[in-house]
Image (cartoon, grey):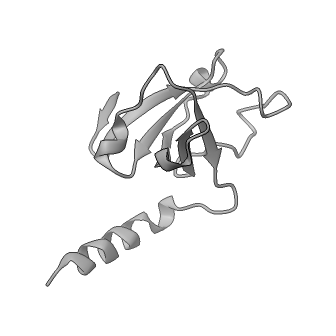
Amino acid sequence: MTFSPRGIAIRLSFSLKFAGKKILWKQSKRLLAGSLVVLMIKGDPSTLKVATVAARPIAGLEQNPPEVDLFFARPEDLELDPTREYIMIEERSGYYEAERHTLLALQHMSQEK
């Protein structure tokens, strides 16, 4: 876990077996900070956990297995079972970090009376 002013980030290691090719991380647009990802326990779609990429240190991505830091949407999603295999899916067509402040303001407005 990494603590920052924006929240708690979790460093996850992951496998590239589904990528099908070697990824050149310095040039890749995969797992950019602010990208939306979803984690799910393999075979159990009721366990979806939404997160955004907090950071992707190149040194962490070039090791085996690669690592990335994630911010989770809900605090209860921070608990991940390390004995279970998760599938991580990245939303590649959108970039949501730019809209983060607007979405948070709308969320606070909807909670006001």
Q: Residue at coordinates 55% horizontally, 29% vertically from top-left?
A: 57
Relative side of 62 to 72, left or right? right
Q: Residue at coordinates 35% horizontally, 33% vertically from top-left?
A: 79
Q: Residue furthest top?
A: 64
In this rendered view, identify the residue nearer to me: 86 or 61.
86
Residue 62 found in image quarter = top right
In this rendered view, identify the residue nearer to me: 8 or 76.
76
In this rendered view, identify the residue nearer to me: 89 or 24.
89
Q: Quadrant of the C terminus?
A: bottom left
Position in image of residue 74 (x %, y %): 33, 50
Position in image of residue 86 (x %, y %): 56, 33
Residue 23 found in image quarter = top right
Relative side of 14 to 20, left or right? left
Position in image of residue 55 (x %, y %): 50, 38
Relative side of 34 to 10, left or right? right
Relative to 81, is 93 above or below?
Answer: below
